[in-house]
Amino acid sequence: MLRIFSHPSCLAHDPGPGHPECPERLIAVAEALRAGLPQLAWLEAPQALRSQLARVHDAELIALVLDQHSAGLRRLDADTVMGEYSADAALRACGASICAVDAIMAGDIERAFCAVRPPGHHATANIAMGFCLFNAMAVAAAHALDAHGLSRVAIIDFDVHHGNGTQDIFAAEERVMYLSSHQATAYPGTGHVYERGVGNLVNAPLPAGCDGELFRKTWRERLLPALAQFRPQLLLISAGFDAHRLDPLADLNLEAADFAWLTTELVAIAQRSAKGRIVSSLEGGYSLAALRECVVAHVGALANP
């Protein structure tokens, strides 16, 4: 059983005119999922608690996002902008992932997709960057460890941009494995093969122009075997769809079928070691047409038994 977690505040987060991480992204995702997978129930995400954020984020970053207010837009860096509802959106994005983990660990559902924004995987312990305020998948992983006593949590990231924040937060945490495929030349310039942490980081940079055949080969030969060997008790997915050939911010050439294929492979691993338990959360993806197609392919594959 799969449920979708979201909240209206995630639509209200508005970083300003012309920004690629726009509310229309989530509108496209919601419309596509409701039309393509109408049988799935939607649940409202709660706010994450400060104490839950503090498992992975410094007090200074939490205060910067939640306690500093200004009229109009507030720019945290060249790309990361907050508006009136951005703090609540970030809390709801993290709350969605926490609530999903709780529901899955309670046995109420088997899998979840968090249709939320802003994205999170660039947010480090102390820096909001790359459109990201808080790191929802990192918050969810820490919650799974601390609140549910898990000892092996995997975060799988197929966004075209490397999740430097997730890697930074867990580089010394052997209970969390982080696996990422990403465009080698893209922002933020991290995610090299030699970045191994304590043996818990598996990075697979892909060349510009990479197609589905090379993407699948890389996952099949390098990333999926490492994941299977780790035997995760819970899989968390940073689901960015900006590796699609239509995306304006990157240079890979994947199709929706490639994301569906990888999702099916991840479900199989989850069935073997994690009782099928998966939480996926929206990260990047800036072509609305590609987002619509890819999110239905991904969530459809997640929803399969």
Image: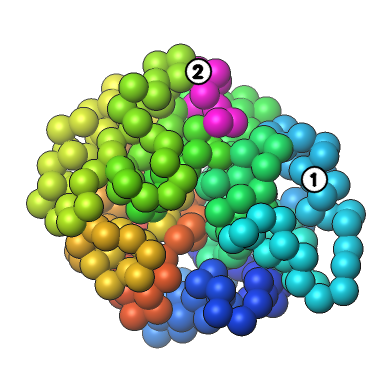
Give the number of the disc on residue 155: none
Q: How is the image coloured?
A: rainbow
Q: Look at the numbered disc 2 and give the secondary structure of its residue.
A: loop
Q: Residue at x 55, y 18 (%)?
A: 172
| On-image quarter of the C terminus | bottom left
Confirm whether the magenta stretch covers residue 171: yes
* Residue 5 seen in this snapshot: no
Disc with the residue nearer the chain's start (2 vs 1): 1
**Whole-percent x and y of residue 227?**
32, 30
* Residue 114 seen in this snapshot: yes
Q: CA distance from mark 2 to mark 1?
A: 25 Å
Q: Which residues are magenta?
A: 168-176
Confirm whether the magenta stretch covers residue 35: no
Would residue 200 be found to the left or right of residue 300 on screen?
A: right
Residue extending furthest toward the left: 213
Q: Residue at x 56, y 54 (%)?
A: 130
* Pointer 1 local density, CA inside 10 Å: few below 14, some 14–19, many at least 20: many
**Whole-percent x and y of residue 149?**
62, 25
Q: Is residue 241 above or below residue 107?
A: below
Q: Quadrant of residue 269?
A: top left
Q: Amino acid at mark 1?
A: Ile
Q: Residue at x 45, y 61 (%)?
A: 284
Q: Label 2, on which residue? A: 174
**Whole-percent x and y of residue 153?**
48, 31
| On-image quarter of the N terminus | bottom left
Q: Disc 2 vs disc 1: which is toward the camera? A: 1
Q: Label 1, on which residue? A: 62
Residue extending furthest toward the front: 78
Q: Amino acid at mark 2?
A: Glu
